[in-house]
Amino acid sequence: MMTAYDVVVAGGGPAGLQFARELGARTDYAVCLLEANPSLTDNDKSTGGTFEQVIDGFDVDESVVMGDSEHVVFEGPTARERLAIQNYVLDFPAFLDWLGEEAASNGVEIRTGERVTGPIVENGAVVGVETTDERVRGRLTVDATGETGVLTTELGMWNRERGQRGIGKEFEVSGTFDSDAMVFRFDHEVAPGGYAWVFPGDNRFKVGVCWVNDFHDRHAPDDRSIDAYLRSWLNRDDRWRVDEIHATHAGAVVSDNSINQRAADGLVAVGDAVSSINPLFGEGIRPGMESARMAADVAIEALGAGDCSRDRLAAYERRWNAEKGDEWRLQRIVGELLYDFDAGQQDAFVRSSGTFSQAGLDRLQRYELTLADLLRLYPARASDLSKLPRVARHLS
């Protein structure tokens, strides 16, 4: 069996749905989105923490926002700083459902329960996708399959083996939380080789732990699972009382400095299918949706010109690299050092964040930190010199 569209989007996360939403709202092209899960809301991989660039920049409906606050708290093992950064917590399944409804209302066909298994390639160009049941053709194909990179991996666009792997897990709970701020905790006793978080909502709050595997292996005192670390923190922190765990969200990530091939003949890749996660703090929703909008801008022009060659589509890749490139390379290095800090450096990092002006905090929240900002945040030690060969690879 074979069906055909102008555009085929593989994957129904924020990046894929936003791309479909853009095309549906701005064009009359026949767009089909294929999602492997039986429902869009079955995607449980994100924490839903985000900032104004997503809420305002993508006109997110307030009905899918669980809560918001005016401050972010950074914590180390003993240090604590309260930072004036507006933030939001999304009901992530409801957010995906809303994005899908927005796309469908503009004519996008959303097909759930359809797993994409690989690209259809003819004469060197991608002309659609294979699913477990059929072949779906398109003038343009979009890989939004997340960290598995179903299409980009097979096409050799992104070397996932060079990326770093990490995992995260959170519980969405009801009870009481003695804070009105989003909390990030850098503490190897709670999250060895990563960080922990608390995101407050109006009726529930989210508590989670994540780490980068390489640094977890160096700093974990034992072989407890991520579930065990999360439950331990949940049970021993006296700032909250948990009445019930309502949902569990978990996922893996493969990330690098995001400077990868994003276009091929007949295909663009968005979101984590080509590693769009921020390398410093690991946020994925915002950069994933930004990549979708950038790709949609170029795709609309390419479709209109009848030219979906890599030469034409690479304008998206160039724009991404120009906007993120050098800054994210530096942030990748600082991120690698951050998750390898000892306890004293974690506290020093937190205290340094508290010295930033409001303009500096705005740059931090936008991931537009200058080299001076990064040096100010980074608590250098002589022992860090031994790490230079390891981090130097991120400059290439």
Image: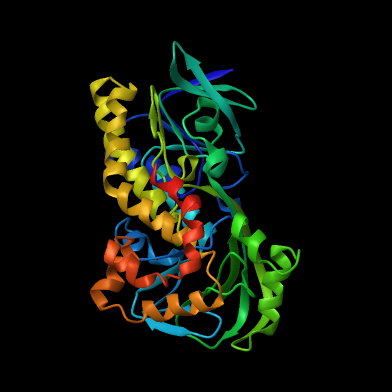
Residue in front for this viewpoint, 284 or 205: 284
Residue 200 visible in the shown view: no
202 relative to 115 in the view: left or right = left
Q: Is residue 318 left or right of residue 200?
A: left
Which part of the image, by quadrant, shows the N terminus?
Answer: top right
Quadrant location, the C terminus: top left
Q: Residue at x 56, y 33 (%)?
A: 150
Percent position of residue 319, x then y:
27, 41
Q: Position of residue 224 (x, y in %)?
A: 75, 66
Q: Which percent across, then down, holds residue 152?
A: 50, 32
Where residue 244 sits, quadrant-wise, is bottom right
Front in this rendered view, residue 232 or 371 = 371
Q: Is residue 294 above or below residue 83?
A: above
Q: Is residue 233 above or below residue 97?
A: below
Horizontal and vertical percent position of residue 358: 26, 77
Is residue 42 visible from the viewing direction of this image? yes
Judge whether 360 appears above or below 270 on screen.
below
- Residue sitting at the far top: 123
